[in-house]
Image (tube, rainbow, N blue to C red):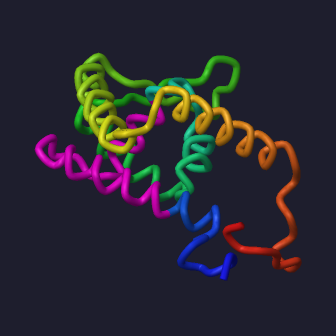
Amino acid sequence: MADSPIQDPGLGFLITDLARLIRDDFTARMADIGMTQAQWRVLTHLARMEGCRQAELAEILEVAPITLARLLDRLEESGLIERRPRPGDRRAVQLMLTPKARPLIRKIWARGAQTRTVALTGVSDAERDAMFATLIRMRDNLAARPAPSRRTGGSHGR
């Protein structure tokens, strides 16, 4: 019974479920700001990687470039981002936050801190530090190797 799905949901399933719950809590906290989840995701990623190209951001967000282009159009029309020519490459643009976006980003980070506080309730500092170190190591392990072929199958979530 040690391998029971109820006792051991699998690492991938657990992480996916946790990510969904964190995202749902955060989305509820963002309701009064009047932004869609897709919009605040774009802004938060841009805050971390300002100056990136649209293709880079689409890959990180796991959305089609055309979908991202529409989101960026709306955010640009709202005065929250701007597209600037990328130095050294006339064909490419870099994505930048505007000064109008900065107070909004601070609100987003504050709401994120509230969600983290709830998620980490009852977790000691040592447990938190060990969890983050472990998750970072796991991410780095997987990022360092080529993705397996889709044909090979493999164990899902474990």
Residue 83 within the magenta-colored segment of the rendering: no
What quarter of the picture does the N terminus occupy?
bottom right
Q: Is residue 95 visible?
A: yes
- Residue 15, given in percent of the width and then of the height, sits at 55, 57
| Residue lying farthest to the left in this orientation | 32
Q: Is residue 25 magenta?
A: yes
Q: Residue at x 29, y 16 (%)?
A: 99
| Residue 61 picture location, percent across and down | 53, 50
Q: Position of residue 22 (x, y in %)?
A: 37, 51
Among the 4 quarters of the image, the one containing residue 47: top left
Residue at the image point whose x is 27% and y is 28% from the top: 110
Q: Which residue is depicted at the point 62% across and 49% down?
A: 59
- Determine the image quadrant of residue 54: top right
Q: Which quarter of the picture shows residue 32?
A: top left
Q: Residue at x 86, y 65 (%)?
A: 148
Going by the picture, which residue comes out furthest to the front? Answer: 1
Give above or below for 109 relative to 139: above
Q: Which residues are magenta?
A: 17-46
Q: How many marks?
A: 0
Return the residue nearer the eye: 121 or 107. Answer: 121
